[in-house]
């Protein structure tokens, strides 16, 4: 059974940093691209960042480019999101999502339950 | 990176068919057959319903179908059921390792 478990969400002050983690199990992690998608409670989905199976292809939404860094450790079956210079508008539930393919543009077939990031003073 | 355009809401009666549109540009929807559709019930994680424009994952009802014409992708749900009431989102590849979602559509089953 595929499982994606996010962690690291917290209440943090504007300008500070936070690192999210996603532990994956139930599939061959290094065969697939992975993504972070966020959702402000009550609002729509926003793609944040994606990384290919071998970290060779990485993309970011304009809203986080230069502040967030996605990475993965295939030996640990884990995905990460380093979030720097956090802003109030980064407040959201952050989902980890598995791509159907190794490249990163085929669709998200499994999702975690999300970890909540709140940016507030 | 502009969000794709979806209607805020659509509705239909049980047994009817409805279609949700997803309008992008020549840089995203119009340039790639890489649109996916997600269903999200309140308090739940999204669920993949259609990928690569027209393909249905295993386990998804054949009442759900996807299509595309020009810069607009569409999700059609036939034989509407009460359990289909949910929010629906489209997502398209936009080149350069970028993906973009639509704003979402709330489906109400009357």
Image: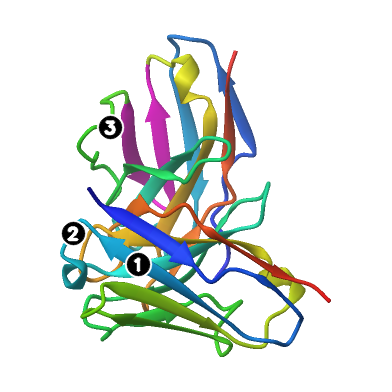
Q: Are marks 3 and 1 in contact (CB under 8 Å)?
A: no
Instruction: List x then y, in percent, for residue A47.
Output: 49, 64
Quarter occupied by the N terminus of chain B: bottom right
- Decide: few, some or many residues near mark 1? Use Cα within 10 Å; few <14, some 14-19, many ≥20: some
Q: With respect to residue B53, does A47 lie above or below?
A: below
Quadrant assignment for the C terminus of chain B = top right
**Label 2 vs label 1, nearer the camera:** 1
Q: Nearer the viewer, mark 2 or mark 3?
A: 2
Q: Is residue B75 magenta?
A: yes
Q: SS class of the residue under badge 2?
A: loop
* Whole-number angstrom distance, CA of label 2 to CA of label 1: 12 Å
Main SS of residues in magenta: strand
Query: Which residue position is annotated with label 2?
Result: A27
The residue at 31%/54% (across/down) is A3
Residue A108 visible in rendering: no
Q: Nearer the viewer, mark 3 or mark 1?
A: 1
Q: In terms of secondary structure, where does tag 3 sit?
A: loop
Q: Position of residue A32 (x, y in %)?
A: 22, 67
Q: Chain of mark 2?
A: A
**Left/right of residue A113 with respect to residue A30 in the rendered view:** right
Nearest the viewer among B100 and A92 is: A92
Query: Which label sits on residue B60?
Result: 3
Residue hosting label 1: A23
- Label count reads 3
In the rendered image, residue A64 lying in the magenta stretch gets the answer no
Q: Does the residue at mark 2 contact the one at mark 3 (Cβ under 8 Å)?
A: no
| B42, B93: nearer the viewer | B42
Residues in magenta, as a range? B64-78
Q: Residue at x 26, y 77 (%)?
A: A76
């Amino acid at each position: 059974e595929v499982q994606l478990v996010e962690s690291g969400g917290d209440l943090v002050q504007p300008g500070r940093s936070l690192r999210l983690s996603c532990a994956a199990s139930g599939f061959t992690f290094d065969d697939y691209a992975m993504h972070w998608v966020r959702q402000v409670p009550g609002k729509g989905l926003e793609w944040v960042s994606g990384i290919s199976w071998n970290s060779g292809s990485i993309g970011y939404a304009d809203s986080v480019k230069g502040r967030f860094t996605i990475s993965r450790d295939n030996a640990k079956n884990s995905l990460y999101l380093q979030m720097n210079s956090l802003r109030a508008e980064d407040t959201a539930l952050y989902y980890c999502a598995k791509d159907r393919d190794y490249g990163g543009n085929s669709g998200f077939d499994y999702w975690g339950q999300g970890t909540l990031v709140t940016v507030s003073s | 990176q502009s969000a794709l355009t979806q209607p805020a809401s659509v509705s239909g009666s049980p047994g009817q068919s409805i279609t949700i549109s997803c309008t992008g540009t020549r840089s995203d929807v119009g340039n790639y057959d890489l649109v996916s559709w997600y269903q999200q019930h309140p308090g739940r994680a999204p669920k993949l319903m259609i990928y690569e424009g027209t393909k249905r994952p295993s386990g998804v009802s054949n009442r759900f179908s996807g299509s595309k014409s020009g810069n607009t992708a569409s999700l059609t749900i036939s034989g509407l059921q009460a359990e289909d009431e949910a929010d629906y989102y489209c997502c398209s590849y936009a080149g350069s390792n970028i993906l973009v979602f639509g704003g979402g559509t709330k489906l109400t089953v009357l």
